[in-house]
Amino acid sequence: MGQEGGLESSLTGGCAMAHEPDASALAEEIAKLEDLCQKTAQAIASARSVREAVALADVDVPHHLRAFARVKVPSLGRLARQTDLRVEEIVKDQLSSLTFERSDIVASREFDRIKAVDWHVLRVNYPELYAKALREANLILERKRKR
């Protein structure tokens, strides 16, 4: 019996020691993911285009961390909302740039450029915002033509 108790404690101690490196490696990976998410959030905040903001938001979470990454890495959960807000802000800036153009021809060309370069991503990822922004841009251009 004395040997069984000694055997159990040595097995338990061995298991605990075997799990410690795994736990610390897991904690290290979670810390790296948190750091990556924070850097990504900063990059999204400074994104200049819809395409850039959406591309940055795609953070690759390792398969073995996916089950609990949202709980353990708070900044990962905030990335989607932050991206949505940044995309809306970029679109507002693009629409206001159309408003400030004096010439309807220049505004129309600028709108064509924005649509070609940036808004295909908007149409795919944010269809409701795309439709709303398209209506607003067309109203802005129509008002410019009537002046």
Image (cartoon, grey):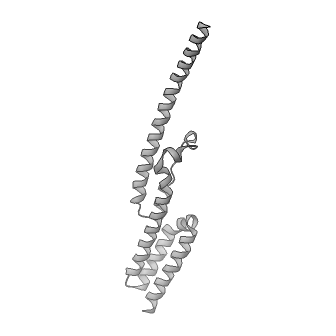
Could you tell me residue 134's position as x and y percent?
A: 53, 77
Q: In which quarter of the image is residue 65?
A: top right
Q: Residue furthest front?
A: 1
Report the residue that reaches farthest toward the bottom.
147
Q: Identify which residue is drawn at 48% across, 38% down.
A: 29
Q: In which quarter of the image is the C terminus?
A: bottom left
Q: Which residue is drawn at 50% across and 79% down?
A: 136
Q: Position of residue 140 (x, y in %)?
A: 46, 83
Looking at the image, residue 55 lies above or below residue 91? above
Image x and y of residue 23, in percent: 50, 31
Which of 101/32 is in front?
Answer: 32
**Quadrant for the N terminus in the image:** top right
Measured along the vertical axis of the image, is residue 88 above or below residue 22?
below
The residue depicted at 58 percent of the width and 43 percent of the height is 67
**Is 106 placed left or right of 136 in the picture?**
left
Q: How many marks?
A: 0
Is residue 12 or residue 30 the one in the foreground? Answer: 12
Q: In this view, does 70 lie above or below 12?
A: below
Instruction: Determine which quarter of the picture holds residue 31.
Output: top left
**Residue 55 position within the rendered picture, expressed as x and y whole percent measured from the top left:** 49, 57
